[in-house]
């Protein structure tokens, strides 16, 4: 049967449009089922807590449940690896941070690439650290601390949460940046390290704000500087490293959201918008501030912002981690 020319052209145009319509329909349909965010650590820790705080308001904007799935082991590399192997459809995501998406690239022999095997979605929150010392340390500001350390090379002790932790490698960076040296004392976590600092068993630490601020407020330890460009809202009286005399010594643990490589750009855009909306919520901001965390500026809360930030962190920390010979247990 021979079709009239007008009808033939109409049918041909409709057929040509089908792939585009199909792609648009898929984008509009997402999400069609619950979304899993894999937190690569056990429940109850700082990363898990931040993920749950962000996931709650994401449900409202996405219109589907956002489920937190805890997959611990090997400092997060097991859970992150699971996401790397997941279907790139936007339904399995990785909640990552400095340890899982920077340090593990040196500490472990990974079966995935931290950059090439993921699509960045958004930076979320940042936790600055504070340089603190025991109450009886003979220094009252950062310049005084550095002078005391230089006068006593290799004699002072600096506690940390374990080999390869941010507290540990930031201590190495501090020594390189300030021209000082001290003994590194690893603990099984931040709590016992801080306990010994309060007791005067060690001299100093570079510790996360959440752990350090209560002891600073109690007058149990001395605060020398915040390792950030600006002062903390939770502790505005503590000067920054730039103000204190060690400019550029920035140390933080950050949180971000990643998807498997190949996840469609329209899906990434929807997830990014959901994170942005969630992180602007007043209740979210308050709860994160209580944890010593601050939301990244909106201009950094983009896929491109997370990608650039992660690359910069790898360039900064990998040489230090490799130089220290740090390997995961």
Image (cartoon, rainbow, N blue to C red):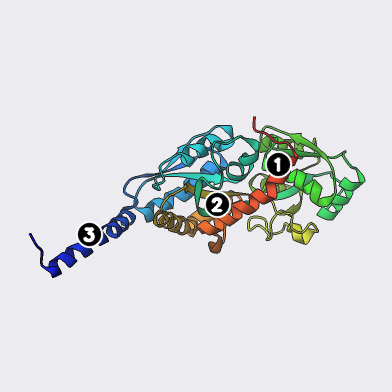
Tell me: 21 left or right of 207: left
Which of these two is toward me, 271 or 142? 271
Which of these two is toward me, 125 or 213? 125
The image quarter containing residue 294 is bottom right
Q: Give the foreground label among 1 and 3.
A: 3
Tell me: 148 left or right of 284: right
> Please, is residue 68 above or below residue 21 in the view?
above
Q: Which mark is residue 321?
A: 1
Q: Is residue 128 visible?
A: no
| Mark 1 or mark 3: whose residue is earlier in sequence | 3
Give the labeled residue for mark 3.
15
| Mark 3 or mark 2: whose residue is earlier in sequence | 3
Q: Residue at x 79, y 56 (%)?
A: 246
Q: CA distance from mark 2 to mark 1?
A: 29 Å
Q: Position of residue 197 (x, y in %)?
A: 76, 39
Q: Which mark is residue 91?
A: none
Residue at the outermost left position: 1
> Please, is residue 162 above or below residue 20 in the view?
above
The image quarter containing residue 137 is top right
Q: Residue at x 54, y 39 (%)?
A: 112
Q: CA distance from mark 3 to mark 2?
A: 51 Å
Q: Is residue 158 visible?
A: yes
Q: CA distance from mark 1 to mark 3?
A: 56 Å
Tell me: 227 left or right of 290: right
In the picture, the quarter occupied by the N terminus is bottom left
Task: Kindly state the secondary structure of the residue where label 2 is placed.
Answer: helix
Give the labeled residue for mark 2.
288
Task: Kindly state the secondary structure of the residue where label 1 is placed.
Answer: helix
Q: Position of residue 200 (x, y in %)?
A: 80, 38
Q: Position of residue 229 (x, y in %)?
A: 69, 60
């Amino acid at each position: 049967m021979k079709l009239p020319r007008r009808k033939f052209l109409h049918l041909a145009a409709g057929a040509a449009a089908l792939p585009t319509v199909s792609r648009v329909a898929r984008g509009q349909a997402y999400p069609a089922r619950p979304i899993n965010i894999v937190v690569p650590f056990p429940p109850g820790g700082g990363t898990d807590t931040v993920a749950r705080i962000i996931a709650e308001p994401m449900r409202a904007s996405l219109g589907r449940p956002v489920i937190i799935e805890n997959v611990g082991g090997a400092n997060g590399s097991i859970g992150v690896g699971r996401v790397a192997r997941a279907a790139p459809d936007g339904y399995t995501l990785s909640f990552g941070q400095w340890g899982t998406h920077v340090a593990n690239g040196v500490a472990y022999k990974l079966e995935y690439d931290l950059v090439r095997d993921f699509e960045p979605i958004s930076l979320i929150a940042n936790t600055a650290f504070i340089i603190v010392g025991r109450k009886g340390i003979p220094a009252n500001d950062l310049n005084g601390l550095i002078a005391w350390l230089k006068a006593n090379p290799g004699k002072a002790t600096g506690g940390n949460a374990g080999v390869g932790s941010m507290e540990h490698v930031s201590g190495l960076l501090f020594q390189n940046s300030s021209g000082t040296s001290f003994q590194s004392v690893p603990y099984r976590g931040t709590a016992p390290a801080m306990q010994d600092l309060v007791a005067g068993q060690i001299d100093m630490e570079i510790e996360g704000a959440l752990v350090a601020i209560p002891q600073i407020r109690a007058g149990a330890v001395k605060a020398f500087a915040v390792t950030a460009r600006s002062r903390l809202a939770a502790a505005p009286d503590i000067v920054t490293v730039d103000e204190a005399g060690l400019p550029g010594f920035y140390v933080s643990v950050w949180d971000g959201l990643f998807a498997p490589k190949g996840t469609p750009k329209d899906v990434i855009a929807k997830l990014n918008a959901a994170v942005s909306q969630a992180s602007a919520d007043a209740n979210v901001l308050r709860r994160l501030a209580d944890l010593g965390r601050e939301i990244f500026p909106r201009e950094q809360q983009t896929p491109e912002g997370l990608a650039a930030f992660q690359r910069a962190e790898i360039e900064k920390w990998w040489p230090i981690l490799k130089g220290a010979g740090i390997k995961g247990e």
